[in-house]
Amino acid sequence: MEGSPSNRWLSLKQASALLGVHPATLRRWANRGEIPVFFTPGGHRRFALEDLIRFTQARRQAGALVGPDQGWTSRALSHTRSKLTAQPPHWLAAFSEADREHKRALGRRLMGVLLQYLNLGEDEDESTAALIAEARAIGQEHARNAIRLGLPLATAVEAALFFRDALLEVALQLPEGMPVRMEAHTRLTQRINRVLNEVQLSVIRTYESEAFR
């Protein structure tokens, strides 16, 4: 049973090496029921090779959502442009082409933060803190751009909410036919909202500290 990864049953170390993740990450997935695990009489974890293959295939299908995949970025940007074209919001006229390009750049940065955050475990650590700080910095830049244009806070928040909704709509579009348990979908939504909430709050705090002095 402790042989090469070609055997049916793999140890925690072998399975995590096969998946390319840290053993602690695989242990966390197993504890959450995201991947089946068998315990030996001695209390050691064993993973079936067939389960690992299925898990890998499912994650590959969901790569546009939870992996460093440029496809998700392209879809999000395309979806945002479609929404802007179909029914241009009133605040759009205030942004020059340079401002709009700045917004697109911030959108790409935010999507990068989201992808990295979704790939992390749920335990708070230095990596999590760094990504949350980056989300706040993005919100701060949104706010400073709006302040420079003389936009009121309500308009700045409305613009931020527009881009937030566009990102969330694309992020939650899972591949058709992919089985996703309700609790996993809820947890995913919560983690996406954690990042987007930080951006929104940062917009408001920046106005409070820099525009209302």
Image (cartoon, rainbow, N blue to C red):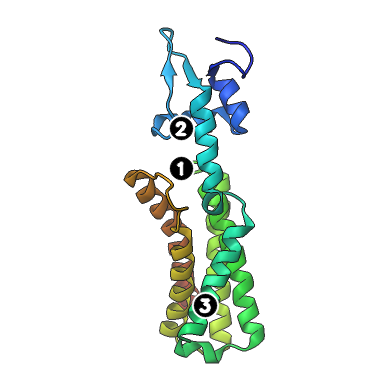
Sequence order check, earlier mark of 1 and 3: 3
| Element carrying mark 3 | helix
User: Which of the marked residues, 2 or 1, is nearer the chain's N terminus?
Assistant: 2
Q: Is residue 213 visible?
A: no
Q: CA distance from mark 1 to mark 3?
A: 33 Å
Query: What residue sits right under mark 2 in the picture?
Result: 28
Is residue 128 placed above or below 149 in the rendered structure?
above
Tell me the crowding category of disc 1: few under 14, some 14 to 19, or many 20 or more residues within 10 angstroms, Cα based.
Answer: few
Give the distance between the C-alpha atoms of the residues marked 2 and 1, in whole angstroms: 9 Å
Relative vertical location of residue 188 with respect to residue 40 in this rendering, above or below? below
Residue 184: x %, y % from top left: 38, 45
Determine whether label 2 and label 1 are within 8 Å by CB: yes
Where 91 falls versus 29 (above or below)?
Answer: below
Residue drawn at (45%, 75%) of the image: 162
Q: Report the residue that reaches farthest toward the top.
A: 41
| Tag 3 residue | 82
